[in-house]
Image (cartoon, rainbow, N blue to C red):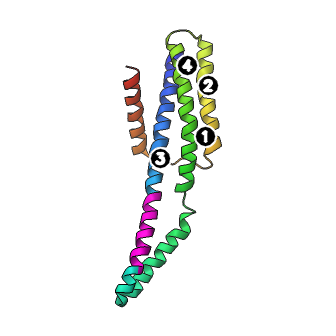
Amino acid sequence: MTQNQYWTEIYQLKMHIAFIELLLERSEKVDRGLRIVVAVASSSSIGAWAIWNTLSWLWASVIALSQVVTAINQYLPYRSRMKAYSSLLVDLEELMIQAELKWHSISDGQLTTAEINKARFEIRSSKQKSLNKHIQTTIPTDKKLQEIAEMQASNYFLTFYK
């Protein structure tokens, strides 16, 4: 039973890693998209304004909007999330390596029930320390990303632990 609990713990850890990777990827896409939109809006609006003076109010509005987005962009959570998620992933992936290494001893029957329980709670404790260290707010929930993360975790273990 304790072996199953340990296995569940490393499965959950792998799923959390996959979920954070997906959140990081999404944050990078949003940040990149905002930057591209602002750059294109500013550049094209200035050029269009010079060419079509008759709609100068429209181009002035587009430029003003891009300036507002530029100003508020620093307050949007995507950049800070990217940094936090990247740092958290480093810690969690290292923890995953250590957990898998320990799993080999557990699956071979080299550890007692007490040692397995201790190892399981060490994973939890380390994961919680990493979360507290890197995440200053909440992690957004996303059912679709959670399902994808679970599928990725399952595929990982099917590939390496058939």
Of the image marks 1 and 3, the number of the one nearer the N terminus: 3
Q: Which mark is residue 131?
A: 1
Reading the chain from its start, which is encountered first: label 2 or label 1?
A: 2
Q: Nearer the viewer, mark 3 or mark 2?
A: 3
Whichever of labels 1 and 4 marks the residue nearer the N terminus, that label is: 4
Q: Which residue is mark 4?
A: 102
Disc 4, disc 3: CB below 8 Å?
no
- Secondary structure beneath label 4: helix
In three-dimensional space, the C-alpha distance between marks 4 and 3, rounded to whole angstroms, equals 28 Å
Q: Check disc 1 and give the amino acid type.
A: Leu
- Would residue 127 be found to the left or right of residue 155 on screen? right
Residue most extreme to the bottom: 54
Asked if the residue at tag 2 contacts the one at tag 3, i.e. Cβ–Cβ closer than 8 Å, the answer is no
The residues colored magenta run: 31-46
Q: Is residue 105 above or below residue 64?
A: above
- Compare residues 121 and 91 and report the one nearer the observer: 91
Horizontally, is 121 left or right of 162 in the view?
Answer: right
Q: CA distance from mark 1 to mark 3?
A: 14 Å
**Mark 4 or mark 2, which is nearer to you?**
4
**Which residue position is annotated with label 2?**
121
